[in-house]
Image: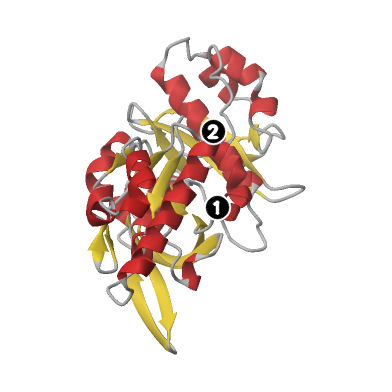
Amino acid sequence: MATQVFLNDISLPDGVIGYSEAKKTFLAFVHLLKEVRRRDRAFVLYLPVMVSDLQIGPCSVAKLRNDADCSDESLWLKTLADRAPYAASLAELSGPDSRAYEFIYHDCQDGTIRDRRVEGLGLAYLFDSLAVAFNHDHRWRVEWVEVERRELTDAGEIIAGPVRVRHAGLPAHLATHAALFAPEPSLPQDGRALWRDRAELFPHLAFIGRVRPQLEAFEHGDERLRQVWKRFGKLDRAVGTWDPAVSKQPVYGIEVKEESESRIDAGLVDFQDDEGITRPFSLHFSVTPDPHRVHFRLETAPTARAVIGHVGRKLGIG
């Protein structure tokens, strides 16, 4: 699957820089994108507007393309797979519903803090991917950017807290995020192969016994097999990089929700684990086609892992 890369749209220089600085910034950004392509020739860049309409200081990319010093970069940009605007391009991505989230960057300049709503950084976080930036400003010459994540829950509550976003303003930063560009393993032949190879495929996941027949029921070509395998991979990677001492939950890269209190109280997500203990598996994510879900719980001892308790239809709906 092609790597998803999102432009950090607030890294676009404003009108205070001159033409020569704008040209320098443009050339550096194209160099960064070339380095991304060297790692993944099929990567896709998601933008607020098309590349030619991006405004770098006093001029647009379309204007810079006519500069003789930028001719090679202009030709290269024509080969770029890009999508814009963000809202329209999200339809082709399989991931969380961004409408339930808001991301705020606390911009501190000259001793003043200004809250700025960010879209590209937020999408990079939600899709467990990478944000790239124009590096004219020292704030964007970093490998991680911290933003505030605000989420509207199903209960109508707003949960807020800081999160870190993978980021690259310089080509050297890409080495930090090398795992994003690693080739994905091949999709298992069927659910029986997925169950058989689960420990090798997903070292940070565990599966209780009741999940075995649910997985083994997936036949070759079943879209649910591909969806489950893909989401297991993201969950495994998230748990593998999670430090429970730093955050309550991992950075999932998929839309994970807590079951409603009424359904928890009804015992709909209580399952007996392999130790014979009945425990709640209230965290879940959806699998196409609805209303299929995967329920899991997080454990931190002896090591951090996610324990899968259910893969199948939404429980309690018949």
Mark 1 highlights which residue? 171
Q: Secondary structure at mark 1?
A: helix
Residue 123: % across, % down: 38, 52
Spatial CA span between label 2 and label 1: 30 Å
**Residue 232 tag number:** 2
Residue 92: % across, % down: 30, 34
Name which quarter of the figure residue 90 lies in.
Answer: top left
Task: Give neighbour class at mark 2: few <14, some 14-19, many 20+ (Cα, 10 Å).
Answer: many
Viewer can see residue 125: no
Query: What colouring method underlies this structural image?
Result: secondary structure
285, 90: nearer the viewer: 90
Residue at horizontal 43%, vertical 36%?
A: 43
- Farthest residue to the right: give it: 302
Tell which circle, 2 or 1, labels the residue nearer the N-terminal end.
Answer: 1
Name which quarter of the figure residue 15 lies in.
Answer: bottom left
Residue 62: % across, % down: 23, 52
Residue at horizontal 47%, vertical 43%?
A: 34
Residue at horizontal 53%, vertical 12%?
A: 190
Above or below 211: residue 44: below
Residue at horizontal 40%, vertical 19%?
A: 223
Q: Amino acid at mark 1?
A: Pro
Q: Secondary structure at mark 2?
A: helix
Question: Given this view, does label 2 or label 1 mark the residue nearer the observer?
Answer: 1
Q: Amino acid at mark 2?
A: Phe
In the shown orientation, is residue 155 left or right of residue 167? Answer: left
Task: Give neighbour class at mark 1: few <14, some 14-19, many 20+ (Cα, 10 Å).
Answer: some
Residue 144: % across, % down: 54, 61
Figure label count: 2
In the shown orientation, is residue 314 left or right of residue 183? Answer: left
Name which quarter of the figure residue 309 lies in.
Answer: top right
Above or below 208: residue 37: below
